[in-house]
Image (tube, rainbow, N blue to C red):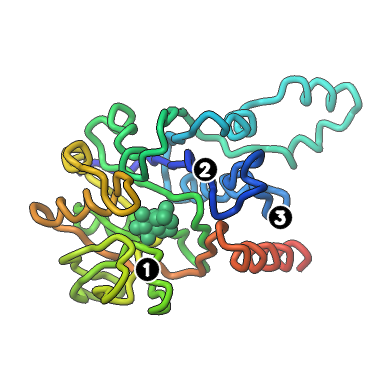
Amino acid sequence: MKKVKKAIIPAAGYGTRNLPITKVLPKEMFPIGGKPAIQYIVEEAVDAGIEEILIVVSRNKNMILDYFDRSLELETFLEKTNKLHLLEKASIPNIHIQYIRQPYAEGLGDAVALGKLFVKNEPFAVILPDDIFLCRRKVALAQLIETYNEHHSSVIGLQKVKPELLKNYGVIKGEKLKGRQYQITDIVEKPENSPPSDLAVTGRYIFNPTIFTYLEKLEQGVGGEIQLTDAIKDLLAEENCIGMCIAGDRYDIGSDTDYLKLMNRVKKKYSN
Ligand code: G1P
């Protein structure tokens, strides 16, 4: 069986929840303890054994490309001024990253569909950079990959969410398999009423490449967008799909409260 070595990071959204700052600063570049949010995501991918990343960007996200690029100017300056040791502080994860632009903001499903040529015929991860996980043992993605290696079917990262917040998420219906694993039987994007459970989709997925056949057939869903959740719903009619409750604390950096909580937590870690 093929190993999960590739990951798609959709980072093309406008960040409307965080306006006005997102007019000039992509949410993925929000600083957390001196590093941008997306670096935590890339480091998680590296820790989980991912070898190649595709970041889906849009016109106003060039800062992300600049960040993961070398800055020869800076390196020359630090060398000249005998401060090369400071470069370690500026070091970026050593992993192959490619980029693709999403021309129209047509939704998460559309962004993931752009990764078809990158993925080829391999299983792959999707990591949403809004959701940052701090986990005690294994990073969130490694927990999903472990489950994938057991079942070889798509795996969706879940967490229990307060009932009044479920309308902001994809929500699954499922039967408990064992431990943290669920057999998913249905999924609904942002249910307005009667969510099928309190288990929300939390920004970490592993898919077999068959997901692209479902993505390609999709029409606009909730919010007039091509929804990844709708492709998962179609997949459920044909294939097995496992839900895995991620062990760890999740911070949605699009929420001011979560962002502040995360900053505080990282600050504590650094000052200890
Ligand atoms: C997306 C997905 C949703 C998922 C959420 C997790 O929604 O469509 O199913 O629960 O991410 O963060 P968004 O937050 O982009 O509206």
Q: Amino acid at mark 2?
A: Tyr
Q: Is residue 226 above or below residue 72?
A: below
Mark closer to the observer (3, 2): 2
Q: Is residue 102 above or below residue 135?
A: above
Mark closer to the observer (3, 1): 1
Badge 1 is on which residue? 167
The answer to whether 267 appears left or right of 231 in the picture is right
Residue 102 horizontal/vertical position (percent): 41, 31
Residue 21 horizontal/vertical position (percent): 67, 47
The image quadrant where one finds the C terminus is: bottom right
Badge 2 is on which residue? 14
Q: In the depicted view, which residue is nearer to us: 133 or 103?
A: 103
The answer to whether 272 appears left or right of 81 in the picture is left
Q: Dot 1: within a 10 Å radius of its alpha carbon, few (fewer than 14), some, or many (20 or more) residues?
A: some
Which is more N-terminal, label 2 or label 1? 2
Query: Looking at the image, which residue is at 25% across and 37% down?
Result: 122
Query: Looking at the image, which residue is at 63% across and 38% down?
Result: 92
Q: Amino acid at mark 3?
A: Gly
Q: Amino acid at mark 1?
A: Lys
Q: In the depicted view, which residue is nearer to us: 242 or 169?
A: 169
